[in-house]
Image (tube, helix red, strand yellow):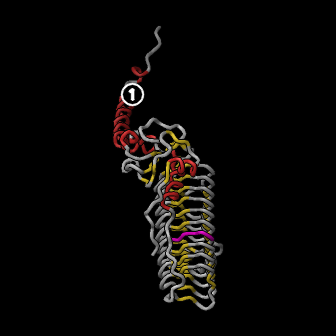
Amino acid sequence: MDTMDNSTQKRTLREIAEHVGGRIFGDPETVIHGAATLNEAREGDISFLVNRKYEKQLEGTRAGAVIVGREAPEARVPLLVVQDPYYAFAQVLVLLYGQRKHPAVGISPRAAIAAGAEIGEDCHIHDFVTVAATARIGRGCVIYPCAYIGEGVQIGNDTIVHANVVIYEKCRIGARAIIHANTTIGTDGFGFATHDGVHHKIPQLGDVVIEDDVEIGACCSIERGTLSDTVIGRGSKLGDLVTIGHGARVGSHCLIVAQAGIAGSTTLGHHCTLGGQVGIVGHITVGNNVTIGAQSGVINSIADGQTIAGAPAIDLKQARRAYAMIPYLPQIRQDLRSLQNQLEKITAALSARPRDAAEPQDAE
């Protein structure tokens, strides 16, 4: 299996600053050989600060240096000031540790590769992989044990398919994609015609298209379309246990967190972010740059740039006000009942008063 090399290369803070384009406050010759959170960092580790509520941790951190934003707080450790601390920290992690290493195994004699399949140069296909006829795998791909590549599947260059992944027939996977273990791509969409109480299966004639630079987490399910293709746009990232329904279209550079589900024939714009366990109904359109809070239920189309939350999902500011009232609802209900009782008593008292008492006569 693949391994992550946890060894690091030592770098000075000066070298790191040149790599990420930052400014140093402190000793530029500070040697960095690891990375950690502010709480766990030790001498020689570099950390980062994004959320200002953790700023107090700067006082007690033992980090060798900390990456911070433009408004650099005072600290007793060297600081590296950058425009985007989290992105810079990611760059530093790659600089120090590199990406996951994949062993060069060539093509295992225990892999079952059909005669009509095409395998590109410098591919590494592990034990018990099955590649069906007319499948085409680009150069530099890694296919881990027990994966199944169906008939007519196309996989672009430098794509990684982890263990036990199943890719059904005719699906198209772009270049530099990463598909994690136990994910299934191209399953039949959940399509049935109910007649006289019996559910009749509808043939799913579409395919699945995964564009370049997409990463799909473990145990995901991407359904093929009934008539049109299901599409995951370029650069989008899906967490574990995500389900994409038949004929859905996910735009480019979206982030879909674990356990989210998008029903069939729904369109998601580009640069959308879905929190964990978000559910979106079918046949609606979610605009570009939309953010949806965790566990939200989206039942209507959403315009560009909206930030929504709740079930059913509404504008985030309204949702926050509404949810802030929840602890007070029992007392509000009790107060309303009390006011209603008082109003009924006042109404009854007014109704019982004599007419001459209720309407005083004009003075003569």
Crowding at dot 1, Cα within 10 Å, few <14 / some 14-19 / many 20+, comes out as few
Residue 196 in view here: no
Residue 87 belongs to the span the image colors magenta = no
Q: x%, y% of residue 60?
A: 36, 41
Q: Residue at 50% across / 37% down in the picture? A: 72
Question: Relative to the observer, which residue lies in front, 310 or 335?
Answer: 310
Q: Which residues are magenta?
A: 175-179
Q: Residue at 58% across / 62% down in the picture? A: 236
Q: Residue at 48% across / 39% down in the picture? A: 26
Residue 299 in view here: yes
- In the displayed structure image, the side of residue 289 where residue 324 appears, left or right: left
Q: Is residue 244 above or below residue 84?
A: below
Q: Name the residue that disc number 1 marks.
A: 350
Residue 178 belongs to the span the image colors magenta = yes
How many numbered markers are drawn? Answer: 1
Q: Quadrant of residue 119?
A: bottom right
- In the displayed structure image, the side of residue 306 where residue 25 appears, left or right: left
Q: x%, y% of residue 245?
A: 55, 69
